[in-house]
Amino acid sequence: MEYGENTEDAVLREMFEETGLKTNILSLVGVYSDPHRDPRGHTVTIAYLLKRTDGELSAGDDAISAKFFKVNKLPSLAFDHAEIVKDAFERVKHGILSKM
């Protein structure tokens, strides 16, 4: 997040900068704040479920590549990111997509 930026604007901006995709927010997935979730230090993640509205997938300046994966073919994920992805898919599965 940039100073003075809200989380909703930050996720849309970061998604575009890192992937080239324009998106809309469908729902808040959750807030992940366990002080021990990342061995590098205490971090907080606010995860949103997004819908692509435009753009072509491409890696941002700090990534080697950007790819889509099938749900049952996800690579290993760092820290608690598998839990975050699981929570997002549960929201989709159960139709919990509150408009923001």
Image (tube, rainbow, N blue to C red):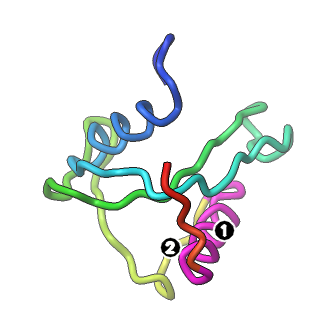
Q: In this view, does 8 lie above or below 79?
A: above
Please identify the residue farthest to the right as the structure is shown.
35
Marks 2 and 1, how far apart in space?
A: 17 Å
Viewer-nearest residue: 7 or 14: 7
Q: Where is residue 64 in the image (x, y as percent from the top left)?
A: 29, 50
Check if residue 58 falls in the magenta segment.
no
- Residue at 65 percent of width and 61 percent of height: 84
Amino acid type at circle 2 is: Pro
- SS at mark 2? loop
Q: Where is residue 48 in the image (x, y as percent from the top left)?
A: 53, 52
Q: Which mark is residue 11?
A: none
Q: Is residue 39 above or below residue 5?
A: below
Amino acid type at circle 1 is: Asp
- SS at mark 1? helix
- Graded by Cα atoms within 10 Å as few (under 14), some (14 to 19) or many (20 or more), the crowding at tag 2 reads few
Residue matched to label 1: 87
- Residue at 64 percent of width and 72 percent of height: 86
- Residue at 84 percent of width and 44 percent of height: 34
Magenta segment, principal secondary structure? helix
- Graded by Cα atoms within 10 Å as few (under 14), some (14 to 19) or many (20 or more), the crowding at tag 1 reads some
Circle nearer the viewer, 2 or 1: 1
Which stretch did the figure color magenta?
78-94
Q: In this view, does 93 lie to the left or right of 60?
A: right
Q: In this view, does 50 lie to the left or right of 27?
A: left
Q: In this view, does 93 lie above or below 75?
A: below
Please identify the residue farthest to the bottom as the structure is shown.
72
Residue matched to label 2: 75
